[in-house]
Image: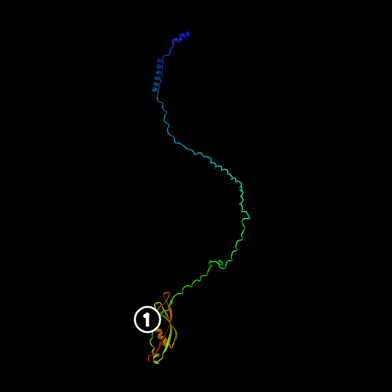
Amino acid sequence: MYADRYAGGRRFSPTGLAAAVGINVAVIGALMVAAPLVTAPPVPDEPLETYRIPLDPVPPPDPAPRTEAKTQPRIDAPVPPIPLPPTDTWTLQPLPPIPDQPAGGGTAGGTGTAPVDIPVPPPALPVIVAPGIDPRYADAFQPAYPPSEQRLGNTGTVTVRVLIGIDGRVKQVERVAAASDAFFRATERQALSRWRFRPGTRDGVPQEAWRTMTVRFVLDS
């Protein structure tokens, strides 16, 4: 009987619940607005100190384990036998004899060539041209008659060797034979002063050369 009385006197009211929730929210909001803002005092920046910490050396990596190559055993495959033709269908023929090789490397009875010694021609000799008389001075070759020999009526010949330079002039006179000293002296003076030649050449190049000359002394009758 008491239970029914209490149960019938308390009923759930949605309006009262909403009012209670609204009051709690309002109180909490007021507390949050009214609460003072608390901030920590600023901390001054201090210099950062660093320390070097020694580290143990890194050990080298372990070498990779060596793996030995495994050699496979060699297996020789059997060689199949080559079938041979029956012996009654073929016969061995002897090879023909090799002909003897002649001396010199040629083939006997053939057209091969043997080494032949080709004579080497000797070097060409130089072309030497002897000096000749310059025709422009042909009248100047006769020496003057020595007065002493002319008074005595003597005649004779003189043979000399003269060295002719590349300019055609006589550079030296050598006595070969003379009828008298007077005849030789007259010939020597004439050769050194008046004789002119075309110089001798060697392969077209002028060079000094010797030439033998003979002069006759004859009185006019």
Q: Dot 1: what SS?
A: helix
Q: What kind of residue is marked 1?
A: Pro
x, y percent for residue 84: 61, 53
| Left or right of 34 on screen, residue 91 | right
Nearer-the-camera pick, 141 or 76: 76
Residue matched to label 1: 135
| Up-down relation of residue 35 to residue 143 (above or below) | above
Nearer-the-camera pick, 97 or 142: 97
| Up-down relation of residue 24 to residue 79 (above or below) | above
Which residue is at 37% across, 81% downward? Answer: 135
Q: How is the image coloured?
A: rainbow
| Left or right of 191 on screen, residue 59 | right
| Up-down relation of residue 187 to residue 104 (above or below) | below
Q: Residue furthest right?
A: 87
* Quarter assignment of residue 194: bottom left
x, y percent for residue 104: 56, 68
x, y percent for residue 80: 61, 50
